Image (cartoon, rainbow, N blue to C red):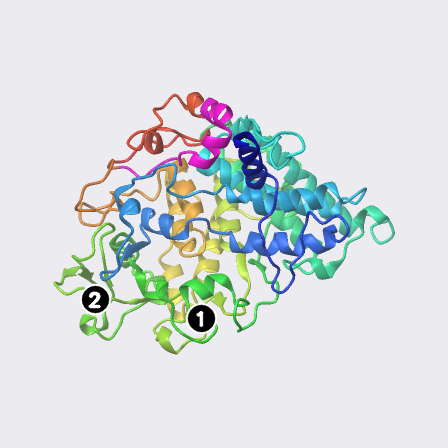
Amino acid sequence: MKKLIVLLLIVAATGFSGCEKWLDVNKNPNDATRATPDLILPGVLKVWAEDMDPLKTTFGAWMGYWAHAGGWSGWYTTKKYEITSSFMSLYGYYTGPLTDSRFVRVNSGDNVVYPAITDVVDAWYYSHLVDAYGDVPYTEACQPDLTLTPKYDDDKKIYLDLIARLTNAVNVFYNKVNAPDASTNAIYAFKNSVDIVFGGNFDNWRKLANTLKLRLVMRMTEDTTVAALKSLMDNTADKGFLTSDALINPGYTVSSGKTNPVWNTFGKSYSNVIQSANTQYTLNRYMHQKLALTADPRLTALWFAPASAPSGNLVSIKFGTDGDLVVQPNTTVAANYHWVLICSDAGVDPATKTKTGTLGAVEGTVAFLKSESYFLQAEALARGILDPAVVGTNVNTAFRNGITASLDACKVPAADKATYLGTVADITGDPLATKIRKIIEEKWIANYFLNHFESWCDYRRTGYPDPVGLGPDYEMLSYYPGGIIRRQIPRLFPYPQGDYDLNKANTQAAITKQGVPFTTNAYPFDARVFWDKAPVVK
Protein backbone atom coordinates (compact mmCIF):
# COMPACT_ATOMS: atom_id res chain seq x y z
CA MET A 1 0.00 0.00 0.00
CA LYS A 2 2.83 2.38 0.90
CA LYS A 3 4.43 1.80 -2.52
CA LEU A 4 1.15 2.59 -4.24
CA ILE A 5 0.82 5.89 -2.37
CA VAL A 6 4.37 6.90 -3.27
CA LEU A 7 3.78 6.03 -6.92
CA LEU A 8 0.63 8.16 -7.02
CA LEU A 9 2.53 11.07 -5.47
CA ILE A 10 5.26 10.79 -8.09
CA VAL A 11 2.73 10.82 -10.91
CA ALA A 12 1.02 13.83 -9.39
CA ALA A 13 4.34 15.65 -9.08
CA THR A 14 5.69 14.92 -12.54
CA GLY A 15 2.94 14.02 -14.92
CA PHE A 16 0.00 16.37 -14.67
CA SER A 17 -0.51 20.04 -15.33
CA GLY A 18 -1.77 22.38 -12.65
CA CYS A 19 -5.21 23.91 -12.95
CA GLU A 20 -4.00 26.90 -14.93
CA LYS A 21 -6.71 28.92 -16.63
CA TRP A 22 -6.65 31.29 -19.53
CA LEU A 23 -9.02 33.79 -17.99
CA ASP A 24 -12.34 31.90 -18.08
CA VAL A 25 -10.98 29.00 -20.13
CA ASN A 26 -10.50 25.81 -18.10
CA LYS A 27 -9.33 23.07 -20.44
CA ASN A 28 -7.73 19.90 -19.18
CA PRO A 29 -4.73 19.09 -21.40
CA ASN A 30 -5.01 15.45 -20.38
CA ASP A 31 -8.54 15.12 -21.79
CA ALA A 32 -7.74 13.64 -25.21
CA THR A 33 -11.33 14.07 -26.42
CA ARG A 34 -11.21 17.86 -25.95
CA ALA A 35 -7.64 19.10 -25.80
CA THR A 36 -5.91 20.39 -28.93
CA PRO A 37 -2.86 22.60 -29.45
CA ASP A 38 -5.20 25.51 -30.24
CA LEU A 39 -6.91 25.12 -26.87
CA ILE A 40 -3.79 24.59 -24.79
CA LEU A 41 -1.34 27.09 -26.33
CA PRO A 42 -3.06 30.27 -25.03
CA GLY A 43 -2.89 28.88 -21.49
CA VAL A 44 0.80 28.05 -21.93
CA LEU A 45 1.49 31.61 -23.06
CA LYS A 46 -0.59 33.17 -20.27
CA VAL A 47 1.22 31.22 -17.56
CA TRP A 48 4.51 32.10 -19.25
CA ALA A 49 3.64 35.79 -18.89
CA GLU A 50 2.90 35.39 -15.21
CA ASP A 51 6.16 33.52 -14.58
CA MET A 52 8.27 36.16 -16.31
CA ASP A 53 10.34 37.29 -13.35
CA PRO A 54 10.66 34.36 -10.95
CA LEU A 55 11.26 35.28 -7.34
CA LYS A 56 10.93 39.01 -8.10
CA THR A 57 11.06 40.04 -4.45
CA THR A 58 14.05 37.85 -3.53
CA PHE A 59 16.22 39.04 -6.41
CA GLY A 60 14.91 42.58 -6.01
CA ALA A 61 16.50 42.56 -2.56
CA TRP A 62 19.68 40.70 -3.46
CA MET A 63 20.40 42.85 -6.50
CA GLY A 64 20.26 46.19 -4.72
CA TYR A 65 16.84 47.38 -5.89
CA TRP A 66 14.61 46.82 -2.87
CA ALA A 67 14.77 46.88 0.89
CA HIS A 68 12.12 45.94 3.43
CA ALA A 69 10.02 48.77 4.82
CA GLY A 70 9.66 48.97 8.58
CA GLY A 71 6.42 47.67 10.04
CA TRP A 72 6.44 44.43 8.03
CA SER A 73 7.52 41.10 9.41
CA GLY A 74 9.30 38.35 7.52
CA TRP A 75 12.03 38.41 4.90
CA TYR A 76 14.46 36.88 7.40
CA THR A 77 15.72 34.03 5.22
CA THR A 78 16.18 36.44 2.31
CA LYS A 79 18.04 38.94 4.49
CA LYS A 80 20.26 36.22 6.00
CA TYR A 81 20.93 34.46 2.66
CA GLU A 82 19.58 31.36 4.41
CA ILE A 83 18.84 29.31 1.31
CA THR A 84 17.63 25.77 1.97
CA SER A 85 15.90 23.11 -0.11
CA SER A 86 12.57 24.48 1.06
CA PHE A 87 13.37 28.17 0.42
CA MET A 88 11.80 28.49 -3.03
CA SER A 89 11.27 26.22 -5.99
CA LEU A 90 10.99 26.73 -9.72
CA TYR A 91 10.14 23.05 -10.19
CA GLY A 92 6.48 23.94 -10.63
CA TYR A 93 7.50 24.73 -14.21
CA TYR A 94 7.62 20.99 -14.86
CA THR A 95 4.12 20.14 -13.67
CA GLY A 96 2.51 23.17 -15.29
CA PRO A 97 3.73 25.05 -18.38
CA LEU A 98 6.42 22.58 -19.52
CA THR A 99 3.99 19.66 -19.40
CA ASP A 100 1.42 21.67 -21.36
CA SER A 101 4.06 22.90 -23.80
CA ARG A 102 5.09 19.32 -24.48
CA PHE A 103 1.44 18.43 -25.14
CA VAL A 104 1.26 21.14 -27.81
CA ARG A 105 4.52 19.99 -29.38
CA VAL A 106 3.77 16.26 -29.59
CA ASN A 107 0.20 16.78 -30.77
CA SER A 108 0.96 19.16 -33.64
CA GLY A 109 1.41 16.47 -36.29
CA ASP A 110 3.35 17.74 -39.30
CA ASN A 111 2.77 21.37 -38.37
CA VAL A 112 6.02 23.22 -37.61
CA VAL A 113 4.69 26.52 -36.26
CA TYR A 114 3.17 25.33 -32.99
CA PRO A 115 6.29 23.34 -32.01
CA ALA A 116 8.46 26.37 -32.87
CA ILE A 117 6.49 28.50 -30.41
CA THR A 118 7.00 25.83 -27.75
CA ASP A 119 10.72 25.92 -28.56
CA VAL A 120 10.71 29.57 -27.47
CA VAL A 121 8.65 28.90 -24.35
CA ASP A 122 10.77 25.88 -23.39
CA ALA A 123 14.00 27.80 -23.93
CA TRP A 124 12.82 30.45 -21.51
CA TYR A 125 11.73 27.98 -18.82
CA TYR A 126 14.60 25.52 -19.08
CA SER A 127 17.23 28.26 -19.20
CA HIS A 128 15.79 29.67 -15.98
CA LEU A 129 15.91 26.24 -14.38
CA VAL A 130 19.55 25.83 -15.43
CA ASP A 131 20.40 29.36 -14.30
CA ALA A 132 18.92 28.67 -10.86
CA TYR A 133 20.03 25.05 -10.28
CA GLY A 134 22.66 23.94 -12.80
CA ASP A 135 21.97 20.38 -13.99
CA VAL A 136 18.22 19.66 -14.17
CA PRO A 137 15.89 17.10 -15.79
CA TYR A 138 15.53 17.87 -19.50
CA THR A 139 15.59 15.02 -22.04
CA GLU A 140 13.43 12.78 -19.84
CA ALA A 141 11.37 15.54 -18.20
CA CYS A 142 7.56 15.71 -18.38
CA GLN A 143 7.31 12.16 -19.71
CA PRO A 144 5.70 9.99 -17.01
CA ASP A 145 5.08 7.31 -19.62
CA LEU A 146 8.87 7.07 -20.02
CA THR A 147 10.07 7.47 -16.44
CA LEU A 148 8.94 8.81 -13.09
CA THR A 149 12.54 9.53 -12.07
CA PRO A 150 14.06 11.56 -14.92
CA LYS A 151 17.81 11.88 -15.14
CA TYR A 152 19.54 15.22 -14.65
CA ASP A 153 21.14 16.52 -17.84
CA ASP A 154 24.39 18.47 -18.01
CA ASP A 155 23.64 22.19 -17.75
CA LYS A 156 25.81 23.25 -20.69
CA LYS A 157 24.40 20.53 -22.95
CA ILE A 158 20.90 21.76 -22.13
CA TYR A 159 21.90 25.29 -23.10
CA LEU A 160 23.38 24.17 -26.40
CA ASP A 161 20.25 22.18 -27.24
CA LEU A 162 18.03 25.14 -26.38
CA ILE A 163 20.12 27.35 -28.67
CA ALA A 164 19.69 24.80 -31.46
CA ARG A 165 15.93 24.76 -30.88
CA LEU A 166 15.79 28.55 -30.97
CA THR A 167 17.75 28.53 -34.23
CA ASN A 168 15.11 26.19 -35.63
CA ALA A 169 12.34 28.46 -34.35
CA VAL A 170 13.90 31.54 -35.98
CA ASN A 171 14.02 29.73 -39.33
CA VAL A 172 10.47 28.39 -39.01
CA PHE A 173 9.09 31.85 -38.25
CA TYR A 174 11.08 33.32 -41.12
CA ASN A 175 9.70 30.71 -43.50
CA LYS A 176 6.18 31.16 -42.15
CA VAL A 177 6.34 34.70 -43.53
CA ASN A 178 8.65 34.35 -46.52
CA ALA A 179 8.35 30.82 -47.94
CA PRO A 180 6.66 30.78 -51.39
CA ASP A 181 4.12 28.23 -50.15
CA ALA A 182 3.66 29.72 -46.68
CA SER A 183 -0.01 30.52 -47.27
CA THR A 184 -0.92 27.13 -48.72
CA ASN A 185 1.35 24.56 -47.08
CA ALA A 186 -0.38 22.93 -44.10
CA ILE A 187 2.84 22.75 -42.11
CA TYR A 188 2.64 26.55 -41.69
CA ALA A 189 -1.07 26.66 -40.78
CA PHE A 190 -1.77 28.64 -37.63
CA LYS A 191 -4.79 30.09 -35.86
CA ASN A 192 -3.79 33.69 -35.13
CA SER A 193 -6.43 34.14 -32.42
CA VAL A 194 -4.61 31.74 -30.07
CA ASP A 195 -1.47 33.90 -30.13
CA ILE A 196 -1.80 36.23 -27.13
CA VAL A 197 1.73 37.56 -27.62
CA PHE A 198 1.91 38.89 -31.17
CA GLY A 199 -1.49 38.03 -32.64
CA GLY A 200 0.08 35.96 -35.40
CA ASN A 201 2.85 38.41 -36.31
CA PHE A 202 5.66 35.97 -37.05
CA ASP A 203 8.21 38.64 -37.86
CA ASN A 204 7.96 39.53 -34.18
CA TRP A 205 8.13 35.87 -33.14
CA ARG A 206 11.31 35.55 -35.20
CA LYS A 207 12.87 38.55 -33.48
CA LEU A 208 11.86 37.30 -30.03
CA ALA A 209 13.32 33.84 -30.67
CA ASN A 210 16.55 35.35 -31.98
CA THR A 211 16.86 37.77 -29.05
CA LEU A 212 16.28 34.98 -26.53
CA LYS A 213 18.90 32.95 -28.38
CA LEU A 214 21.33 35.87 -28.05
CA ARG A 215 20.63 36.00 -24.30
CA LEU A 216 21.59 32.34 -23.94
CA VAL A 217 24.68 32.74 -26.09
CA MET A 218 25.81 35.75 -24.06
CA ARG A 219 25.40 33.77 -20.83
CA MET A 220 28.38 31.69 -21.97
CA THR A 221 30.86 34.54 -22.52
CA GLU A 222 33.08 33.51 -19.60
CA ASP A 223 32.94 29.79 -20.44
CA THR A 224 33.21 29.59 -24.23
CA THR A 225 35.50 31.24 -26.79
CA VAL A 226 34.38 34.25 -28.78
CA ALA A 227 34.86 32.27 -32.00
CA ALA A 228 32.56 29.50 -30.78
CA LEU A 229 29.90 31.94 -29.62
CA LYS A 230 30.09 33.85 -32.90
CA SER A 231 29.62 30.57 -34.73
CA LEU A 232 26.46 29.90 -32.70
CA MET A 233 25.01 33.29 -33.71
CA ASP A 234 26.22 33.48 -37.30
CA ASN A 235 23.38 31.38 -38.73
CA THR A 236 20.69 33.80 -37.49
CA ALA A 237 22.60 37.06 -36.95
CA ASP A 238 20.87 38.60 -39.98
CA LYS A 239 17.37 37.60 -38.83
CA GLY A 240 16.82 40.63 -36.60
CA PHE A 241 16.30 41.34 -32.90
CA LEU A 242 13.49 42.92 -30.92
CA THR A 243 13.01 46.66 -31.39
CA SER A 244 9.87 46.84 -29.25
CA ASP A 245 8.81 45.28 -25.97
CA ALA A 246 7.26 41.82 -26.29
CA LEU A 247 4.04 41.87 -24.25
CA ILE A 248 1.65 39.05 -23.40
CA ASN A 249 -2.02 39.88 -22.92
CA PRO A 250 -4.76 37.23 -22.86
CA GLY A 251 -7.41 39.94 -22.44
CA TYR A 252 -6.89 41.45 -19.00
CA THR A 253 -9.83 43.46 -17.65
CA VAL A 254 -10.54 45.39 -14.45
CA SER A 255 -12.50 42.61 -12.76
CA SER A 256 -11.91 39.95 -10.16
CA GLY A 257 -9.26 37.43 -11.22
CA LYS A 258 -8.76 39.01 -14.64
CA THR A 259 -6.44 41.97 -14.05
CA ASN A 260 -2.76 41.91 -14.93
CA PRO A 261 -1.34 39.72 -12.12
CA VAL A 262 1.76 41.86 -11.64
CA TRP A 263 -0.37 44.97 -11.29
CA ASN A 264 -2.73 43.12 -8.95
CA THR A 265 0.22 42.29 -6.68
CA PHE A 266 2.28 45.47 -6.78
CA GLY A 267 -0.27 48.09 -7.82
CA LYS A 268 -3.99 48.00 -7.11
CA SER A 269 -6.70 45.40 -6.84
CA TYR A 270 -9.53 45.32 -9.37
CA SER A 271 -11.56 47.33 -6.82
CA ASN A 272 -8.90 50.09 -6.82
CA VAL A 273 -7.35 49.25 -3.44
CA ILE A 274 -3.58 49.82 -3.18
CA GLN A 275 -1.93 46.47 -2.48
CA SER A 276 0.40 45.87 0.46
CA ALA A 277 3.34 45.03 -1.82
CA ASN A 278 3.11 48.60 -3.11
CA THR A 279 4.51 49.85 0.19
CA GLN A 280 6.25 46.75 1.59
CA TYR A 281 9.11 46.78 -0.93
CA THR A 282 11.00 50.02 -0.74
CA LEU A 283 14.01 51.79 -2.19
CA ASN A 284 17.35 50.14 -1.45
CA ARG A 285 20.14 52.51 -0.44
CA TYR A 286 22.39 50.93 -3.10
CA MET A 287 20.05 51.84 -5.96
CA HIS A 288 19.39 55.24 -4.42
CA GLN A 289 23.07 56.13 -4.32
CA LYS A 290 23.87 54.54 -7.68
CA LEU A 291 21.33 56.67 -9.53
CA ALA A 292 21.74 59.80 -7.41
CA LEU A 293 25.47 60.00 -8.20
CA THR A 294 24.73 60.48 -11.90
CA ALA A 295 21.55 62.55 -11.43
CA ASP A 296 19.69 59.78 -13.22
CA PRO A 297 16.11 60.97 -13.85
CA ARG A 298 14.83 57.41 -13.54
CA LEU A 299 15.28 57.66 -9.77
CA THR A 300 12.39 60.07 -9.33
CA ALA A 301 10.47 58.54 -12.21
CA LEU A 302 10.50 55.15 -10.48
CA TRP A 303 10.08 56.29 -6.90
CA PHE A 304 7.67 58.71 -5.24
CA ALA A 305 8.54 60.58 -2.05
CA PRO A 306 5.58 60.60 0.37
CA ALA A 307 4.44 63.71 2.20
CA SER A 308 6.15 62.51 5.40
CA ALA A 309 9.60 62.67 3.80
CA PRO A 310 11.70 65.73 4.67
CA SER A 311 11.38 68.40 1.96
CA GLY A 312 9.74 65.84 -0.30
CA ASN A 313 13.03 64.01 -0.83
CA LEU A 314 13.36 60.30 -1.46
CA VAL A 315 14.45 58.11 1.42
CA SER A 316 16.07 54.69 1.28
CA ILE A 317 16.99 51.74 3.50
CA LYS A 318 19.99 49.46 3.70
CA PHE A 319 18.94 45.96 2.66
CA GLY A 320 18.63 43.76 5.72
CA THR A 321 17.62 46.53 8.13
CA ASP A 322 14.27 48.10 9.00
CA GLY A 323 15.67 51.53 9.75
CA ASP A 324 18.77 53.66 9.29
CA LEU A 325 17.26 55.53 6.39
CA VAL A 326 18.99 58.06 4.23
CA VAL A 327 17.48 61.13 2.60
CA GLN A 328 18.74 62.39 -0.71
CA PRO A 329 21.45 63.63 -0.70
CA ASN A 330 22.52 61.14 1.93
CA THR A 331 21.66 62.83 5.24
CA THR A 332 20.78 60.22 7.86
CA VAL A 333 17.41 60.66 9.58
CA ALA A 334 16.03 58.91 12.62
CA ALA A 335 12.41 58.36 11.61
CA ASN A 336 11.34 55.38 9.56
CA TYR A 337 9.72 56.91 6.51
CA HIS A 338 7.69 54.90 4.08
CA TRP A 339 7.21 55.57 0.41
CA VAL A 340 5.42 54.01 -2.50
CA LEU A 341 6.94 52.20 -5.46
CA ILE A 342 5.87 53.45 -8.84
CA CYS A 343 7.08 52.83 -12.36
CA SER A 344 5.43 55.76 -14.02
CA ASP A 345 5.25 59.45 -14.82
CA ALA A 346 7.64 61.39 -12.60
CA GLY A 347 6.14 62.97 -9.50
CA VAL A 348 2.62 61.58 -9.73
CA ASP A 349 1.05 60.31 -6.52
CA PRO A 350 0.44 56.56 -7.02
CA ALA A 351 -2.69 56.72 -4.85
CA THR A 352 -4.45 58.53 -7.69
CA LYS A 353 -3.11 56.46 -10.56
CA THR A 354 -4.74 53.64 -12.48
CA LYS A 355 -1.67 52.88 -14.56
CA THR A 356 2.08 53.13 -14.01
CA GLY A 357 4.56 53.11 -16.85
CA THR A 358 4.36 49.88 -18.82
CA LEU A 359 2.21 48.34 -16.09
CA GLY A 360 -1.50 48.60 -15.52
CA ALA A 361 -4.60 46.57 -14.75
CA VAL A 362 -5.28 45.79 -18.40
CA GLU A 363 -1.82 46.19 -19.95
CA GLY A 364 0.16 43.17 -21.10
CA THR A 365 2.90 41.54 -19.04
CA VAL A 366 6.44 42.09 -20.31
CA ALA A 367 7.90 38.95 -21.91
CA PHE A 368 11.08 40.60 -23.15
CA LEU A 369 12.26 44.19 -22.90
CA LYS A 370 13.53 45.97 -25.99
CA SER A 371 16.11 47.62 -23.73
CA GLU A 372 17.56 44.18 -22.98
CA SER A 373 17.61 43.42 -26.70
CA TYR A 374 19.74 46.51 -27.33
CA PHE A 375 22.08 45.85 -24.40
CA LEU A 376 22.58 42.24 -25.50
CA GLN A 377 23.47 43.47 -28.98
CA ALA A 378 25.82 46.09 -27.53
CA GLU A 379 27.72 43.53 -25.48
CA ALA A 380 27.82 41.04 -28.36
CA LEU A 381 29.17 43.73 -30.67
CA ALA A 382 31.75 44.79 -28.08
CA ARG A 383 33.00 41.22 -27.73
CA GLY A 384 33.00 40.48 -31.48
CA ILE A 385 30.20 37.91 -31.29
CA LEU A 386 28.03 39.97 -33.63
CA ASP A 387 29.29 41.72 -36.77
CA PRO A 388 28.08 45.34 -37.09
CA ALA A 389 27.91 44.96 -40.87
CA VAL A 390 25.48 42.06 -40.46
CA VAL A 391 23.24 43.45 -37.72
CA GLY A 392 23.25 47.02 -39.03
CA THR A 393 24.32 48.81 -35.86
CA ASN A 394 27.40 49.43 -33.73
CA VAL A 395 28.22 49.06 -30.07
CA ASN A 396 27.66 52.69 -29.11
CA THR A 397 24.37 53.04 -31.00
CA ALA A 398 23.01 49.83 -29.48
CA PHE A 399 24.15 50.99 -26.03
CA ARG A 400 22.40 54.36 -26.36
CA ASN A 401 19.29 52.73 -27.80
CA GLY A 402 19.10 50.55 -24.69
CA ILE A 403 19.35 53.56 -22.38
CA THR A 404 16.76 55.46 -24.42
CA ALA A 405 14.37 52.51 -24.29
CA SER A 406 14.72 52.37 -20.51
CA LEU A 407 14.15 56.11 -20.10
CA ASP A 408 11.06 55.87 -22.29
CA ALA A 409 9.72 52.89 -20.32
CA CYS A 410 10.03 54.97 -17.15
CA LYS A 411 8.18 57.88 -18.78
CA VAL A 412 11.08 60.27 -18.14
CA PRO A 413 10.15 63.73 -19.48
CA ALA A 414 11.76 64.64 -22.80
CA ALA A 415 13.92 67.45 -21.38
CA ASP A 416 15.26 65.26 -18.57
CA LYS A 417 15.89 62.44 -21.01
CA ALA A 418 17.89 64.69 -23.32
CA THR A 419 19.92 66.04 -20.39
CA TYR A 420 20.81 62.57 -19.16
CA LEU A 421 21.67 61.23 -22.61
CA GLY A 422 23.93 64.25 -23.03
CA THR A 423 26.02 62.99 -20.11
CA VAL A 424 26.45 59.49 -21.57
CA ALA A 425 29.88 59.29 -23.19
CA ASP A 426 30.57 57.40 -26.41
CA ILE A 427 31.88 53.95 -25.45
CA THR A 428 33.36 53.08 -28.84
CA GLY A 429 36.95 53.74 -27.79
CA ASP A 430 36.69 52.33 -24.28
CA PRO A 431 38.63 49.19 -23.32
CA LEU A 432 36.52 46.04 -23.49
CA ALA A 433 36.25 45.72 -19.70
CA THR A 434 34.97 49.29 -19.44
CA LYS A 435 32.43 48.71 -22.21
CA ILE A 436 31.11 45.60 -20.45
CA ARG A 437 30.83 47.36 -17.09
CA LYS A 438 28.93 50.32 -18.55
CA ILE A 439 26.59 48.11 -20.57
CA ILE A 440 25.76 45.81 -17.65
CA GLU A 441 25.26 48.70 -15.22
CA GLU A 442 22.79 50.41 -17.56
CA LYS A 443 21.11 47.07 -18.19
CA TRP A 444 20.80 46.62 -14.42
CA ILE A 445 18.89 49.91 -14.19
CA ALA A 446 16.66 48.99 -17.13
CA ASN A 447 15.83 45.60 -15.58
CA TYR A 448 14.46 47.22 -12.44
CA PHE A 449 11.08 45.75 -11.40
CA LEU A 450 10.66 43.93 -14.70
CA ASN A 451 13.54 41.43 -14.66
CA HIS A 452 15.45 41.13 -11.40
CA PHE A 453 16.34 37.51 -12.23
CA GLU A 454 18.27 38.65 -15.30
CA SER A 455 20.28 41.07 -13.18
CA TRP A 456 21.20 38.22 -10.82
CA CYS A 457 22.45 36.22 -13.79
CA ASP A 458 24.46 39.14 -15.18
CA TYR A 459 26.03 39.73 -11.78
CA ARG A 460 27.13 36.10 -11.46
CA ARG A 461 28.51 36.17 -14.99
CA THR A 462 30.31 39.53 -15.01
CA GLY A 463 30.55 40.72 -11.41
CA TYR A 464 28.57 43.88 -12.26
CA PRO A 465 27.23 45.97 -10.79
CA ASP A 466 29.94 45.94 -8.14
CA PRO A 467 28.11 45.23 -4.85
CA VAL A 468 30.65 47.10 -2.69
CA GLY A 469 31.93 49.71 -5.14
CA LEU A 470 29.94 52.62 -3.68
CA GLY A 471 31.52 52.35 -0.24
CA PRO A 472 30.65 50.69 3.07
CA ASP A 473 27.43 52.67 3.61
CA TYR A 474 25.97 51.83 0.20
CA GLU A 475 26.51 48.13 -0.36
CA MET A 476 24.30 45.72 -2.23
CA LEU A 477 25.09 43.06 0.39
CA SER A 478 22.80 42.49 3.36
CA TYR A 479 23.24 44.51 6.54
CA TYR A 480 21.00 42.16 8.55
CA PRO A 481 21.89 42.82 12.23
CA GLY A 482 21.09 39.26 13.28
CA GLY A 483 23.97 37.96 11.18
CA ILE A 484 24.10 36.47 7.69
CA ILE A 485 25.11 32.99 6.57
CA ARG A 486 27.93 34.37 4.45
CA ARG A 487 28.87 37.84 3.23
CA GLN A 488 28.14 36.91 -0.36
CA ILE A 489 25.17 36.97 -2.72
CA PRO A 490 24.07 33.34 -3.29
CA ARG A 491 25.16 31.83 -6.63
CA LEU A 492 22.88 28.79 -6.98
CA PHE A 493 19.75 27.32 -5.44
CA PRO A 494 19.78 23.92 -3.73
CA TYR A 495 17.51 21.34 -5.31
CA PRO A 496 13.97 21.24 -3.84
CA GLN A 497 13.43 18.77 -1.04
CA GLY A 498 10.47 17.22 -2.84
CA ASP A 499 12.54 16.24 -5.84
CA TYR A 500 15.30 14.92 -3.62
CA ASP A 501 12.75 12.72 -1.83
CA LEU A 502 11.12 11.35 -4.99
CA ASN A 503 14.12 11.23 -7.34
CA LYS A 504 16.94 10.80 -4.86
CA ALA A 505 19.52 8.91 -6.94
CA ASN A 506 19.47 11.38 -9.84
CA THR A 507 19.32 14.45 -7.60
CA GLN A 508 22.20 13.19 -5.49
CA ALA A 509 24.28 12.56 -8.62
CA ALA A 510 23.79 16.20 -9.65
CA ILE A 511 24.78 17.38 -6.17
CA THR A 512 27.86 15.15 -6.14
CA LYS A 513 28.94 16.56 -9.51
CA GLN A 514 29.13 20.04 -7.96
CA GLY A 515 31.67 18.78 -5.43
CA VAL A 516 30.27 21.07 -2.76
CA PRO A 517 28.70 20.09 0.59
CA PHE A 518 24.92 20.21 0.32
CA THR A 519 24.59 22.48 3.34
CA THR A 520 23.04 25.89 3.94
CA ASN A 521 26.38 27.59 4.58
CA ALA A 522 28.17 26.09 1.56
CA TYR A 523 26.07 24.96 -1.39
CA PRO A 524 24.24 28.22 -2.30
CA PHE A 525 27.55 30.10 -2.24
CA ASP A 526 30.07 27.63 -3.66
CA ALA A 527 28.04 25.62 -6.19
CA ARG A 528 27.88 27.19 -9.65
CA VAL A 529 26.12 26.84 -12.97
CA PHE A 530 28.56 26.20 -15.82
CA TRP A 531 28.62 29.79 -17.09
CA ASP A 532 29.20 31.41 -13.67
CA LYS A 533 32.88 32.35 -13.64
CA ALA A 534 32.89 35.79 -11.98
CA PRO A 535 35.00 36.15 -8.83
CA VAL A 536 33.21 36.35 -5.51
CA VAL A 537 32.90 39.87 -4.10
CA LYS A 538 32.61 40.03 -0.31
Label 2, label 1: how far apart the Cα atoms are: 24 Å
Dot placed on the residue nearer the N-terminal end, 2 or 1: 1
The residue at which mark 1 appears reads as 269
Q: From the image, which quarter does the C terminus lie in?
A: top left
Query: Residue 97's x, y, as percent?
Result: 59, 47
Disc 1, SS:
loop
Quarter-wise, where is residue 488 in the image?
top left
Asked whether the viewer can see residue 435, the reply is no
Residue holding disc 2: 337
Furthest-front residue in this view = 1
Residue 456 numbered mark, or none = none
Residue at 55%, 67% in the rendered image: 258
Q: Residue 68, percent across and down?
A: 27, 56
Q: Residue at x 39, y 35 (%)?
A: 492
Q: Residue 509 magenta-drawn?
A: yes
Q: Position of residue 23 (x, y in %)?
A: 60, 64
Give the SS element for disc 2.
Answer: loop
* Residue type at tag 1: Ser
Q: Amino acid at mark 2?
A: Tyr
494 is higher (above) or lower (below) than 298: above
